[in-house]
Image (cartoon, grey):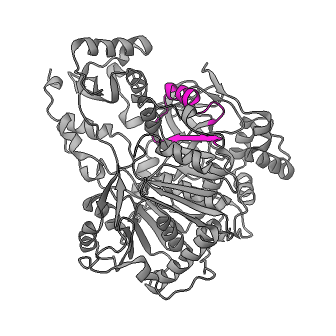
Amino acid sequence: MAEMLWQPSAERVANANLTDFAGLVRERHGLNAADYATLHHWSIDDRAAFWSAVWDYGEVIGDRGDGPVLVDGDRMPGATWFPGARLNFAENLLRRRDDAPAILFRGEDRVRHALDFRQLHEAVSVVAQALRAAGVTAGDRVAGYMPNMPETVIAMLATTSIGAIWSSASPDFGVQGVVDRFGQIGPKVLFSADGYFYGGQRFDSIGRLGSVAEQIPSIERIVVVPYTTAAPDLTAVAKAVTLDEFTAGRASGDIEFERLPFDHPLYIMYSSGTTGAPKCIVHGAGGTLLQHIKELALHSDVKRGERLLYFTTCGWMMWNWQVSALALGATLALYDGSPFHPDGNALFDYVAEEGIETFGTSAKYIDAVKKAGLAPAKTHDLSNLRTILSTGSPLVPESFDFVYESIKRDVCLSSISGGTDIVSCFVLGNPATPVHRGEIQCLGLGLDVRAFDDAGRSVAGEKGELVCTRAFPSMPVGFWNDPDGRKYHDAYFARFDNVWCHGDYVEITERGGVIIYGRSDAVLNPGGVRIGTAEIYRQVEQLEEVVEALVIGQQWEGDVRIVLFVILRGGLALDEALASKIRSHVRANATPRHVPARIVPVTDIPRTRSGKITELAVRDVVHGRAVQNREALANPEALDQFADRPELRV
């Protein structure tokens, strides 16, 4: 049994939004949810009542309609939620119009800015007017090639207020990466900053905009936000104007929100694209709104007037997720740039100075803070911090230890996991239950999440495929340019009929917690034994000599052998003594099956632009197969280190 690391106080449980919600359910439906399991079972057994309660609890602005909440609920895909409803996503996020802070912003150590809710509403109003004047209507696409800054939020809200569809990418994407994504969806307007800061350096974006516009003929207007310079020179970019020029002559006023059907497209997001052209995943306004309200309010305990900082870029679904906190009346604390500039304290400085209650980041960032020897608990006033969220990859048990030992003892550490595919999470935190070492706390409310074995049987206490066996509102409304739905069906429903198969290799514990062992398509299979990559990372990255690792299965002599690539601390070489130490540590703390057959040193590991390591791309390179879309990687040059390694020919 995993060790309990934190337990909420009676006061914390009593004041949790989840407890408040359970009270609403008790009053309306007579359910006395004495524990989370009871509430979760009800939420999947009566999905219509549950999601209707989320609508009410979130005080969703819109017309729910007189018809049923769920039609064809046994079909996946094919279920329809709130078929009579009409709402507008931006209207729900812009419900506050007072002088409380709506957005705080830091662009590394270069820029600080803040907007209150009234100023945010005014800014969205004038941009929405300008978009309408530019011919943007409901269903049109507007794209953002932007840093994580207030103007990005403003552009998204202005776009969605009209009923147009928003899609974004971070500014570190090269021209081909932008074209591969936005070129498929044909945006009418493109928002971009003039550049961005990273690691104390300025990077230019304007030089890429001309090429982007040439290759995406649908773009009629490029709107440039001055960020790194006061007056960017746009003469070389046809169709480009500054944001001030785009909105010139318009006065702020009430926003004309277009209320549209529940499933009206809101966001287009993209698969990583490392095994081919990125898939364009279309998410609906109503499902996204309800799912985010549920996750932010009930699972993350974000409250009106509190402050949320999630370290993300506009190319990661966590950007879309965090922005929805505005619907709760919470304040967004945005950060753009390197989290280690000017040093590793940058984000903790932000949390301490702004009194942030909820801080979200990646598991890799927590590990990097640990390896940098930082101890924020000793150097920062984190008294306001109540919740730490972690996602992007499995949070290993040792990182749980580090958070409680070196960041904060009394904090709800919520490891969460889901994906771009559902713009949300399947498994999340719970402010009213304990945190156990190495475990995600619970299954998401309203989601019938299970682990399936290869025969499609539900298993507990065993490793299996993460699936969801009943429809839920934030399933994609489809893929772009997929008229018969075949691509959508094949992505999630081909393996198990009428069941969403997510592609994570997991275990659901007896107490309802979850352990994630990695992506199913990266699972190792030596001698027919399935091993999650996270099981090996956990052991190897405990060693002080190892900075980071990547593991794959190599086809070898009719079987699969485990190959481990390691980045070592500066000055160290991989000699036989260190290789033996690594193998011994893995054998002693896992099993002999986990021991790598080959250990190979590298100086860099390829990763996606959202920071996830790309095991599949490395596996292709090792086997001599072409990586179809290198532009999807943040550092494609790193792949060269893995090609034709002599260590892997014997």
Establish if 248 lies above or below 75.
Answer: below
Q: Residue at x 24, y 74 (%)?
A: 214
- The image shows residue 541, relative to residue 444, as above or below, that is above
- What is the quadrant of the N terminus in the image? top right
Q: Is residue 553 magenta?
A: no
Q: Nearer the viewer, residue 202 or 278?
A: 202
Q: Is residue 86 visible?
A: yes
Left or right, residue 502 beside residue 540: right
Q: How many numbered markers are drawn?
A: 0
Between 301 and 277, the residue placed more toward the observer is: 301
Q: Position of residue 296 (x, y in %)?
A: 63, 50
- Residue ranking furthest to the bottom: 249
648 with respect to 567 (left or right): left
- Going by the image, does 105 lie left or right of 98? left
Over which residues does the magenta segment extend?
385-412
Q: Quadrant of the C terminus?
A: top left
Write the residue at 50% across / 32% down.
506
Q: Is residue 499 visible?
A: no
Q: Quadrant of residue 304?
A: bottom right
Where 579 sits versus 265, above or below? above
Q: Residue at image x 62%, y 65%?
A: 93
